[in-house]
Amino acid sequence: MPEREQIHKTPQKRQEQESTERSVPTAQGEKIKGELDELLDEIDSVLETNAEEFVKSYIQKGGE
Amino acid sequence: MAVPKVCGIETEYGVSRRGGGEDNPVIASSLLINAYVDDKKVGWDFEDETPARDARGFTRDASNPPEVETHLVNAVLTNGARYYVDHAHPEYSTPECTDAMSVLRADKAGERIIAASMELAGITLGSEGEIVTYKNNSDGKGNSYGCHENYLMDRNCAFGDIVKTLLPWFVTRQIFTGAGKVGAEHDRDPVDFQISARSDFFEEEVGLETTIRRPIVNTRDEPHAMSSQYRRLHVIVGDANLCELSTFLKVGTTAIVLAMIEDNALESDLSIYEPVRALRSVSRDLTCASPLELRSGGSATPIDIQWQFLASAKIYAERTGLEHCGGAIVGEEVLRRWEEVLTDLQGDPLSLDGRLDWVTKFCLLEQFKDRDGLSWSDPKLALIDLQYHDVRPKRSLYERLVQAGKVERLLSEEEVELAISRPPDDTRAYFRGECLRRWPKSIIAANWDSIVFDVGAGSLQRVPMMDPLKGTRNHVEALLNTCDTPLDLIERLGSPLP
């Protein structure tokens, strides 16, 4: 389906960029990666604990 | 002739009671709002509500009665906003504003109000749990709730003309208004991630419904204003946004497009073939560059179509000015940011990380996917999708990104703080908010187009406010300052409201 093919176009482009960056590690690159890891860790610390259960239990009534 | 695009956003929030007590959303929503308004509560006056009236010129018969739930909590705030329970959700409706920056402020203030409500409700509940809310549009299980926009329009503008332009407009504007979503819903084809959280739920091009068979263009005709002069366009297709640029552009661009419709300023027919299907296909195309078939022949990508709208908007700004759609300053800023966003969507959509909700969310999800080796079906990604919208400042992933300097803000926290309690200066919201601030105990009921005062000795007086552009600070501040009591006000007010 044309729609599905399109979805992967952009992310793949980014992944190609990222693998280029990874193959030439720089101090700047390491710093950025470090900050990103820190941010992801921080987000991990505020995420609800049991993802599967939490997502399953979030049910709403339909609205407008 | 374009009328001033007085506008506002009404948002239904997702709500849960956690950590004890029955999870009844109507009770939870009521608890939440009551905790905030407490003794400041003013009732809503339902007398003029007509949700069954259709813009195409008829009123739906009583066999499908409109759902106006008169017994649920319903409050007006000193910033002119309405804060109430609607369809088992807490709903916050901004006051009437004349430009997108003002709406953004009032909408962001709403998030702060909901957050404050949660804290206060938590105190009331104590060990019996807490109320948690989400500024999003669905629960991932087929239930959706809305973030609606409202725009004042000229009654004399043919509704058919409005529909014709709004179909391609709403199909394509989601490339910058989408909040992002993991997965598909409403029995639509599976997808890993899509741009809009609402598009899957739409089934019709035009219609009166808001809860089932949702239409891209809603025909509700309930102007809350002089109906011979004005129409209120009720838009239900938008996503609930957190990124300030997303909200700013959503409202700012739409206001300009509506003014252009009124002034016949759009030259080409941008009608898309099968708009309901296109709404979904655009949502699923993260490149924003897959062509759509045009009814006039040929094809155009969503970005192309948006460029055409922007080109018309720039000519319109030159020839007619943007006075009626945000004013020169905000209007020019809308055009500038719109151009910037289209340029970047064309170059690399992911470069809009930190500026648009769907891109920011997508990039965050990708980062977790990469680091933790997750597939798109991993519940952790669905959790991130949800918790991005958590309204608690400490749990909101959007807020974490803001705090980490990863997201652009258009507003200062100071101006948001002011918008929590102060109404806009330039619409009737000023009169509403100021009366409520000065005489909270004397206002029996209020709604968009009237206030009912208790002037003492059991006498009630209704002040109609049928013109959204009257009752502004310029019109009434001096008068209000001369009044000690509502009775003074009634005696000195002419009719209609100045």
Image: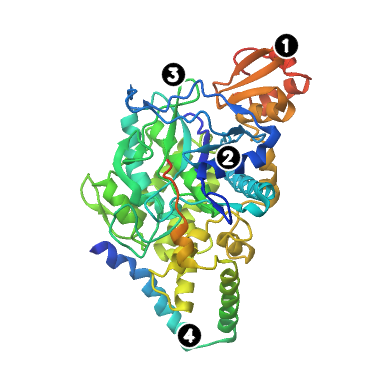
Q: Is residue B289 left or right of residue B6?
A: left
Residue B244's mark?
none
Q: Nearer the viewer, mark 3 or mark 2?
A: 2
The answer to which of marks 3 and 2 sits earlier in the sequence is 2
Q: Amino acid at mark 3?
A: Ser
The answer to whether one can see residue B263 in this image is no
Q: Amino acid at mark 1?
A: Ala
Whole-percent x, y for residue B376 in the image: 39, 69
Q: Amino acid at mark 4?
A: Arg
Whole-percent x, y for residue B184 in the image: 34, 58
Residue at mark 2: chain: B
The residue that mark 4 highlights is A22
The answer to which of marks 1 and 3 sits earlier in the sequence is 3
Name the residue rendered at 71%, 27% in the picture.
B440
Task: Give the structural element (helix, strand or loop) at label 1.
Answer: loop
Kindly check if marks 2 and 1 are in contact, taking CB atoms under 8 A apart as contact.
no
Q: Is residue B337 left or right of residue B456?
A: left
Task: Give the structural element (helix, strand or loop) at label 3.
Answer: loop
Whole-percent x, y for residue B166 in the image: 36, 40
Residue B457's mark?
1
B217 versus B276 height, above or below: above
Q: Amino acid at mark 2?
A: Ser
Whole-percent x, y for residue B483 in the image: 77, 19
How far apart are labels 4 and 1 at the CA level? 79 Å
The answer to whether one can see residue B404 in this image is yes
How far apart are labels 2 and 4 at the CA level? 52 Å
